[in-house]
Amino acid sequence: MFRARYLMLALFAAVAATSLRSDDPQVEAIEKQIAELQKKLAEEKEKAKKTSTPAPTAVGGIVAGASEKHAWRSIGPANMGGRVTSLAVYNADPTLYYVATASGGLLKTVNNGTTFSHLFDNQKTVSIGDVAVCQTNPDLVWVGTGEANPRNSVSYGDGVYKSTDGGKSFTNMGLKETFQIGKILIHPKDPNTVYVGALGRLYGANAERGMFKTTDGGKTWEKVLFVDDKAGVIDAAMDPKDPNTIIAALWERKRDEHDGFFGEAPVPDMYGPVVTHGASGGLYKTSDAGKTWTPVPGPGFHTFSAPRRGRIGFGAGERGLLGRLRW
């Protein structure tokens, strides 16, 4: 407003100077006003220099200093991390849990998911089939690598890993030829006793599958359940009232070299494995901590013939074991 007034008077003075004499009282009055305005303008400019701060320069499209006022947090990946394959919750503090992904490694939260930290980015594989946390020590974590879902974008693993510092560091504890891990069970009273259910190689037969057990924290392993080189453990559950009682679900499946199947039945899922069920699959139970296993002839196994036995999943509650059969 002030500058506009100054410019209007200056323009008026220029016009007046062409039509009035220099000694005209009107010209003298205008010149006096212009001089006062010039002085006022100089004072305002000086005042502005003292009170204003220079505009920040932009760096990479972001105004310098802007990022310092924001707390950045990860909001993904929502795509490349793929599917969430397993959750391991510390029951004494449910705000602390671990999240395993199909191809995005392992994440951990200690504040019920408000923030997550990535823990498995420096290992040889970031494909995880299962994660388990010790219920007497939340820093003791076991990770079974290799996603067990036999889809067309599945990745394989290189055995089982163990952390004793809450995921800050991991050590490979063997079983590197299992390829895909279906389930990990930690003994509730003896953390050195761990069961690892391996689904095995996805694209063909291999002997490194079934149920493995360690009683020395992973230094040595014993294969306690093995049916054949085609079926492996997809899921297992430990009786919460009796840790020596375990039920394991074995699944016979195989992928071929094709991304999709476009032939005729019996393959029901054109993007699924070429073998989706078989006679080697089924339920097996132990009541002596894995020394002996017996088939479980539960409901459905009498109705459907052996070749129709497909994927089976479990859940365990305070009242015991609960199974879900998929045919």
Image (cartoon, rainbow, N blue to C red):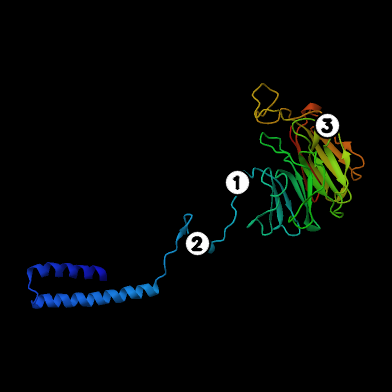
Mark 1 surroundings within 10 Å by alpha-carbon count, few (fewer than 14), some (14 through 19), many (20 or more): few
Q: Can you identify the residue that label 1 sits on?
A: 78
Question: x, y percentage for residue 169?
Answer: 75, 54
Q: Earlier in the sequence, mark 1 or mark 2?
A: 2
Instruction: Name the residue rendered at 85%, 42% in the picture.
Output: 212
Q: Earlier in the sequence, mark 3 or mark 2?
A: 2
- Quadrant showing the C terminus: top right
Q: Can you identify the residue that label 2 sits on?
A: 66
Q: Is 13 situated left or right of 303 in this image?
A: left
Instruction: Name the residue rendered at 50%, 61% in the picture.
Output: 66
Q: Earlier in the sequence, mark 1 or mark 3?
A: 1
Mark 2 surroundings within 10 Å by alpha-carbon count, few (fewer than 14), some (14 through 19), many (20 or more): few
Q: CA distance from mark 3 to mark 2?
A: 59 Å
Q: Is residue 305 visible?
A: no
Does dot 2 land on a helix, a strand or a loop? loop
- Residues at badges 1 and 3 in contact (C-beta under 8 Å)? no
Reply above or below: 86 against 152: below
Q: CA distance from mark 1 to mark 2?
A: 26 Å
Does dot 1 land on a helix, a strand or a loop? loop
Q: Is 248 situated left or right of 102 in this image?
A: right
Q: Quadrant of residue 28?
A: bottom left
Question: x, y percentage for residue 252?
Answer: 78, 31
At label 2, which amino acid type do we have?
A: Ala
Seen from the viewer's position, the closer of residues 31 and 258 is 31
Seen from the viewer's position, the closer of residues 193 and 14 is 14
At label 3, which amino acid type do we have?
A: Asp
Q: Quadrant of residue 137?
A: bottom right
Q: Can you identify the residue that label 3 sits on?
A: 229
Reply above or below: 300 against 173: above
Question: x, y percentage for residue 140?
Answer: 79, 55
Question: x, y percentage for residue 106?
Answer: 70, 49
Residue 67, label in figure: none
